[in-house]
Amino acid sequence: MRLYGVRLSVLDQSPVSEGTSPSEALRNSIDLAVLADQLGFYRYWVAEHHGMAGLAGSSPEILIGHIAENTDRIRVGSGGVMLSHYSSLKVAENFQVLEALHPNRIDMGLGRAPGSDARTAYALQSNGNASGSENYLNSVLEIRQLLRGSNIASGPLAGIEALPRTESTPEMWLLASSEGSASVAAHCGLPLSWAHFINGDGAGTCNLYREHYSPSDEHPLPEVSVGVSVLCADTEDEAHQMLQSLERWRSDGLRGPIPKTSPDGHLSNKLRLVNPSRPMVVGTPDQVRQGLEDIANAYGSEELLLVSICYDHSKRLKSYRLIAEAFQN
């Protein structure tokens, strides 16, 4: 699906709503992926979070396999695997297996952040096999060499292959919400996925990424996707009522599951001021289409990854359906 040449895709964080179980949240992710496949979205990425009761996706590689098995066409990947927790070899082999099962449909999005609090991050890395965020660049280069089947000359991975070997390879992306991670993507000649929903001031950084881009064999030209938080409904009031559950969750410090909206359906002034640095596109189909078009133009991006969190899963499904219909008209 394209809007004026820009691909539309989905980033799913597998939200757990109040009164529901993580199992239901993960099944909802598969449900949404099936719908996205039918509606024509280009790719479907799942996130990695740890120690958060409101987000169920702690193992994107496993969820990717289930989603790919239940869809027909859409690309499926991670947005992203938090590389600081894992060895390069294990990440490469996980995605080689996925690629073997679903050739030419798998994306490997890699992130630098822990996706958790500091204590949980330490527990994930305590076995000593993790790469650590300080070794991010080296880990990215190791994974690319392993996917290419290239020989690594020295260190623990010297002479090691990432198996199984496959005719095709996963498509690598680097996630970023800061200049540091974007500069790694430029240095490595890899596509960049900017988290506008975390840092809405990234257009300049993305331009710097393009200016300093070093072409690679797989990606001779720079490519930018932008992750945008969006909620769409038939009316503006309904869209802002959906937003209320997300803002209440944010105001509680992202603790617990996604709460219900209050009976009156209106955001208080306090909630409206929560996280103003995290811009969202919220409104009717026409309003959302205009907002997404503005963001795509501001970033000069080739793709928008749409992320939606609200209490009611049926309304989340409808939000994506309304967006798809708006761009097909």
Image: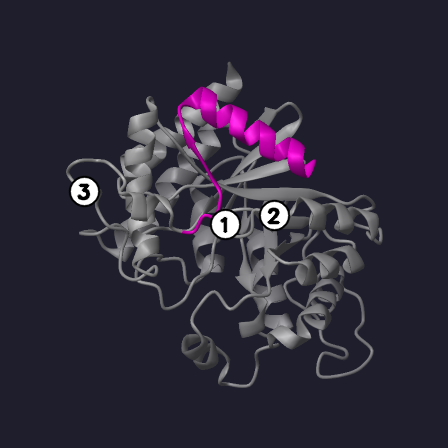
Q: How many marks?
A: 3
Position of 113 relative to 313 (above/below)? below
Compared to 306, does 39 lie above or below? above
Which residue is at the front of the view, 286 or 223? 286
Of the pair 16 and 202, the residue shown nearer to us: 202
Where residue 213 appears, x then y in whole percent?
82, 51
The percent coordinates of residue 166 (x first, y second) are: 67, 55
Determine whether label 2 and label 1 are within 8 Å by CB. yes
Q: Which residues are magenta?
A: 275-301
The quadrant in which the N terminus is found is: top right
Q: In the image, residue 220 lies at what x, y percent? A: 83, 46
- Dot 1 and dot 3 residues touching (CB under 8 Å): no
Can you tell which quarter of the image residue 285 is in?
top left
Residue that label 1 marks: 277
* Amino acid under disc 2: Asp
Mark 1: which secondary structure?
A: loop
Q: Which mark is residue 218?
A: none
Spatial CA span between label 2 and label 1:
8 Å
Question: What amino acid does circle 3 point to?
Answer: Ser
Q: Where does label 2 land, which residue? A: 201
Please tell me which of labels 2 and 3 falls first in the chain: 2
Q: Is residue 66 covered in magenta?
A: no
In terms of secondary structure, where does tag 3 sit? Answer: loop
Does 27 sit left or right of 321 as displayed?
left
Which disc number belongs to residue 262? 3
Q: What residue sits 53% from the left and 53% below the top?
A: 78
Residue 188 position by quadrant: bottom right
Q: Nearer the viewer, mark 1 or mark 3?
A: 1
Q: Is residue 197 left or right of residue 135?
A: left
Query: Disc 1 marks which amino acid?
Result: Ser
Quote the CA–CA distance across marks 2 and 3: 31 Å
Question: Residue 215 location, x and y as percent?
Answer: 84, 51
